Amino acid sequence: MDLKEEILRLLREDPEFRREVMELLGLAPNEMRELKELVRQLTEVVNKLVEGQAKIETRSSEAQKRSEERLTRLESAVEKLAEAQKRSEERLTRLESAVEKLAEAQKRSEERLTRLESAVEKLAEAQKRSEERLTRLESAVEKLAEAQKRSEERLTRVEENLVRLERKVGNIGARWGIDQEEVVREFMAEVFKQEGFDVSLLSSYTYVDEQGVFGEKGDVYEVDILKRNGTTYLIEVKAYAQPKDVSRFNHTCYVVSKVLKLENPVKMMLANVVTQKAVERAKNLGIRLIYGEVEQ
């Protein structure tokens, strides 16, 4: 209780205190009554003020309580907001980490895509080169097909020529009463007679290339050999001679010369009928070709 309230209480309740105050103030009894009345009024005013203060304090206390409750709720909300913020930051951190990983994955994907694009470009270039090679190959195949066609046509003509030759030889055999082999022997005998060769000196020689030294393993090389006045003749007799026959005989002479160690033998081929190209091939290879008829 403050001093003012204590003084007012004493004035109301303690007569001696009132008297002393009156004497101190020099008040008369009637003035004291007025003072008393004034004190009463002041007391009422003070009581009203005290009641008002109490109400104010009560209201203030309730408001304070409400404020504290609101503050408590606010603090709770702030705490929850802080927790939510913390969770948001954690989620944001995880999201940032995920974004970084995605960025790294994207970077790797772009690098792989770049390498893939480079590989595709190289593959396209290789494909282009392959197509160009294929085009050239197709062109070559077309040319080969044309050459094959021409070869077949030539082969057909050769076969036709062989048929005509067989007919010729057959006709000769029929006229002479002998077969084709006999015709060849007769032709050879006539040539030998003109050359002054002794047929009895003619011997056959066969070499089998077991090791494949001169060609395929097992190739057989056959030739007739005649020696006269220090000269060795390698001779082959055929009814019909083409360029390939001349080339094969030339290779046979090479093999036999190597095997028997012959130096500069005379290569001689006898044929009833030859082609013009066979004559030219024999000339180029240094083969003496004796024939009866040239087929055009």
Image: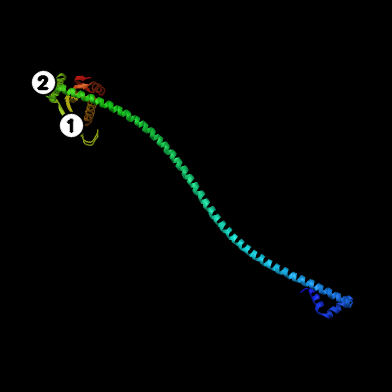
Check disc 1: other Cα within 10 Å, few if <14, some if 14-19, many if 20+: few
In front of the other: 235 or 112: 112
Q: Secondary structure at mark 1?
A: strand
In front of the other: 43 or 154: 43
Question: Residue 95 location in percent, x, y?
Answer: 53, 53
Q: Residue at x 42, y 37 (%)?
A: 124
Amino acid carrying mark 2 in the image? Trp
Amino acid carrying mark 1 in the image? Thr
Numbered-mark total: 2
Q: Does residue 115 appear anywhere in the picture? A: yes
Q: Nearer the observer, disc 2 or disc 1?
A: 2
Q: Work out how far the residue at label 2 is from the one at label 1, CA to CA, in angstroms.
A: 32 Å
Residue named by callout 1: 206
Quarter of the image that includes the N terminus: bottom right
Tell me, for residue 176, which label it has, or none: 2
Q: Is residue 169 left or right of residue 102?
A: left
Quarter of the image that includes the C terminus: top left
Quarter where residue 151 is shown = top left
> Relative to residue 134, is residue 103 depicted above or below?
below
Q: Secondary structure at mark 2?
A: helix
Q: Residue at x 34, y 31 (%)?
A: 138
Question: Residue 53 location in percent, x, y?
Answer: 74, 69
Quarter where residue 89 is shown = bottom right
Of all residues, the one furthest to the bottom in this rendering is: 16
Q: How is the image coloured?
A: rainbow
Q: Is residue 5 left or right of residue 240?
A: right
Q: Does residue 230 appear anywhere in the picture? A: no
Check disc 2: other Cα within 10 Å, few if <14, some if 14-19, many if 20+: few
Question: Residue 218 location in percent, x, y?
Answer: 21, 35
Q: Is residue 238 left or right of residue 149?
A: left
